[in-house]
């Protein structure tokens, strides 16, 4: 049973990695309103460049492994380390959302709210800086 679970987990990780690699090769959708539509900046919609997608993929795989081994709360420390290390808006947005999802349990609801409020403050600051330029 343990071997079957490990095999299934490995297949799931490999399948997810393959689908993410395939998704990076697909062309993007045209913006709503046609080719000449004005798009507003959205850090979460920033294109996933190769290094950025590598970081996000690593975080997804770590989260899955922690969850499979029953240590999902350990990913919280990893997410905080990434927030200390990067200023990339897309990665930070992904980490804030992921962190809030992990914290969104009855015991950690206040932590999830605080995380999302910190993300909102940071996003507003980014938007304000870009609108001044």
Image: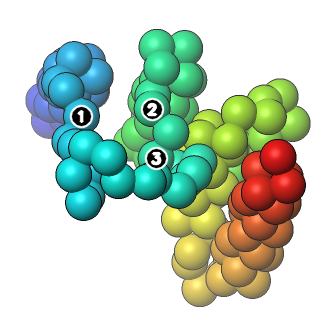
Residue 95 appearing in the image: no
Say whether residue 19 is left or right of residue 118: left
Q: Nearer the viewer, residue 71 or 122?
A: 122
Q: Which residue is mark 3?
A: 45
Please tell me whether mark 3 sits on a helix, a strand or a loop. Answer: helix
Residue under the point 22% across and 17% down: 25
63, above or below 131, in the image: above
Please tell me whether mark 2 sits on a helix, a strand or a loop. Answer: loop
114, above or below 15, in the image: below
Q: Which residue is mark 1?
A: 28
Quarter of the image where one finds residue 80: top right
7, above or below 76, in the image: above
Q: How is the image coloured?
A: rainbow
Q: Which residue is mark 2?
A: 47
- Circles 1 and 2, Cβ within 8 Å, touching? The answer is yes
Residue 106 x %, y % = 59, 85
Q: Nearer the viewer, residue 83 or 42?
A: 42
How far apart are labels 2 and 3 at the CA level?
6 Å
How far apart are labels 1 and 2 at the CA level?
9 Å
Residue under the point 86% across and 36% down: 84
Residue 13 x %, y % = 27, 27
How far apart are labels 1 and 3 at the CA level?
11 Å
Give the mark nearest the N terminus, 1 or 2. 1
Mark 3 neighbour density, 10 Å: few (under 14) some (14–19) many (20 or more): few
Please tell me whether mark 1 sits on a helix, a strand or a loop. Answer: loop
Residue under the point 71% across and 80% down: 113
Q: Nearer the viewer, residue 83 or 35?
A: 35
């Amino acid at each position: 049973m343990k071997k079957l679970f490990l095999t299934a987990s490995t297949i799931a990780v490999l399948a997810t990695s393959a689908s993410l690699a395939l998704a990076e090769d697909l062309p993007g959708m045209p913006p709503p309103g046609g080719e000449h539509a004005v798009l507003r900046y959205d850090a979460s919609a920033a294109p996933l460049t190769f290094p950025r997608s590598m970081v996000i993929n690593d975080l997804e795989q770590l989260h899955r492994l922690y969850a499979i081994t029953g240590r999902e709360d350990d990913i919280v420390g990893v997410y905080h380390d990434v927030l200390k290390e990067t200023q990339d808006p897309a990665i930070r947005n992904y980490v804030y959302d992921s962190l809030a999802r992990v914290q969104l349990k009855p015991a950690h609801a206040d932590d999830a709210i605080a995380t999302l409020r910190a993300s909102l403050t940071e996003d507003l600051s980014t938007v304000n800086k870009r609108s001044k330029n």
